[in-house]
Image: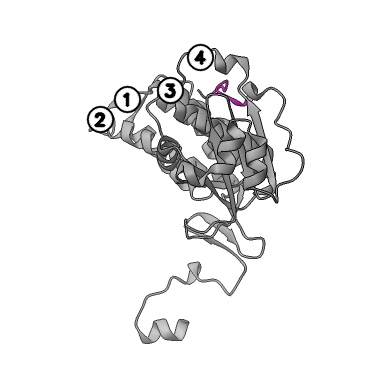
Amino acid sequence: MHEVCNLLRVPLAADKSVAPTTSLTLLGVLIDTQAMTVALPPDKLRALRDSLGTLLTRRKCTKRELLSIVGRLVHAAKCVPPGRAFTRRLLELACSVTGPLHRVRLTAPARADLRWWAEYLPRWSGTFPLLHPDDRATDAVFHTDSSRWGTGACFGDRWWYAAWPEDITRITTPSMTWLELIPLLVCVVMWGDLWAGQRVRIFSDNMGVVGCVSRGWSGDHRIMTLLRHLLFVSACQKCVLAVSYVPTAANGAADSLSRGDLRRFRHLNPAARREADQVPTGLHRYLPATSYS
């Protein structure tokens, strides 16, 4: 390699040249091809935690200070893909003023994004599985659906379903996107440990779900709260979610579960297990009650 670079007159930095190795720091990220992980150096992780804690005690900061934090979060998001959703709005806020010393008010959505990181980082070891670079690559697939009666999902031969608890049925005309997002969260809570280090493809017949998960954002406060919780759990489980649209006619198994129609579900999915997986006790515990809402 050195001979080729010398022949082509490509300059090399001797202090940055290393022998063949399975562990290499590239652009501030430690890549381990033996353990198949990427990691943020411990000193950078500690500095980011401290900076977030300090910023969250303030109501305003300068553009320069906010851009500094955003830069560190973007760097951390190279290792934590679910966290990418919580950097864009912070960057937009920083760019809402012109001068580097101009002050910006930390809005409620911005503080919620900062709290997402502040709550996740202490739980994070600093490493994340090295995922396939192609976003279209899929390691696991599951289907979800919701109706006014309830919700359900199937993953391989595993499945679950549940009628809506009373605290949801009391809501007047709840958003269908919100209802359709709930089973995604329940699935990640239930099966996320099976998906560590995987890209998971979710099929939903609701375009609102496809859009908000793909963007990592929604203008509806209730949906955004649920989305933050969903991405928080997926980051803790070290899996990455992608949602694709499927017509209702092609989502029959999940649709039948959301209506409690087990006879139709068995007909459409004869290979399914005899018994459903148990939904975590108190479905409402996994809904919007989070401190970063």
Q: Which residues are magenta?
A: 286-291
Amino acid found under the numbered disc labelled 3: His
Q: Nearer the viewer, residue 69 or 284?
A: 284
State the image coordinates of residue 165 (x, y, percent, origin top left): 63, 19
* In contact (CB < 8 Å): disc 2 and disc 1: yes
Residue farthest to the right, as pictured: 274
Q: Main secondary structure of the magenta part?
A: loop
Residue depth check, mark 3 versus mark 4: number of the one nearer the observer: 4
- The Cα atoms of the two marked residues, 3 and 4, are separated by 15 Å
The residue beneath circle 2 is 97
> Residue 276 vs residue 48: left or right?
right
The residue beneath circle 3 is 221
State the image coordinates of residue 141 (x, y, percent, origin top left): 58, 50
Looking at marks 2 and 1 on the same chain, the residue that comes earlier in the sequence is marked by: 2
Kind of element beneath mark 4: loop
Res. 74 image quadrant: top left
- The Cα atoms of the two marked residues, 1 and 3, are separated by 22 Å
The residue beneath circle 4 is 171
Using the image, tell me which numbered label, if any, was put on residue 104: 1
Residue depth check, mark 3 versus mark 2: number of the one nearer the observer: 3
